[in-house]
Image: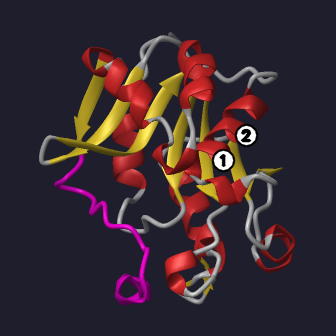
Amino acid sequence: MTNPMIAGLLLAAGGGRRLGGRPKALLDHRGRPLVEHAVRVLREGGCTHVYVVLGADADVVRKKASLPGCVLIDNPEWEEGMGSSLRAGLTSLRDTDADAALVSLVDQPGIGPTAVARVHAAYRSPATLAAAAYDGERGHPVLFGADHWAGITVSAVGDRGARAYLKEHASEITLVECGDVAQAYDIDTPADLIHLE
């Protein structure tokens, strides 16, 4: 398929409960909000269209972060967990020309453009399911062809995101090894802040 439209979908709504209520999108990374870094990674990895799901302190994120050209999606149900942000993001993509969504998480700065580009390149059709793998274990980013969006939207609840759907469709997933080019740690606790510069 020539020039499929693979939208970058960044989940950046978390309130950082284990970080003392500091929204993850606004964590400082290289002197700028972490959400800017995550958007840049998606763009450099091949996503020309980037959608960002905001939740905790969304108004502050809009003011402090420079996100030109991004479609910003408010998730009023962000406190329910990542599943609600995934639902909000995929729902917003339904009325676009996107063939797939490449989903990444704002709190994984160890995953750079090379890993995104590898998963992006795994797209074959709207039926594609692909995910980065780290030593053979599935991680992020994850690519969902448009054929899967409705099923994922129904099953994405709580903090599990698309985990149940992916487990059900495990035989269809193309795993793309990225352990040689990325580190899949999360910024969840104050101890994890050591990973931010």
- Please tell me which residue is depicted at 63% across the width and 82% down the height of the picture: 21
Residue type, label 1: Ser
Question: Is 166 located above or below residue 49 in the figure?
Answer: above
Tell me the magenta residue range: 178-197
Give residue 24's position: percent from left, percent from top. 59, 73
Residue underneath mark 1:
85
Residue underneath mark 2:
88
Mark 2 and mark 1 residues within 8 Å of each other at the beta carbon: yes
Secondary structure state at the residue bearing disc 1: helix
Tell whether position 26 is magenta. Answer: no
Give residue 137's position: percent from left, percent from top. 19, 43
- Please tell me which residue is depicted at 61% across the width and 59% down the height of the picture: 39
Here the colouring is secondary structure
Residue situated in front as seen by the camera: 172 or 125: 172
Residue 74 shown left or right of residue 122 in the figure: right
Residue type, label 2: Ala
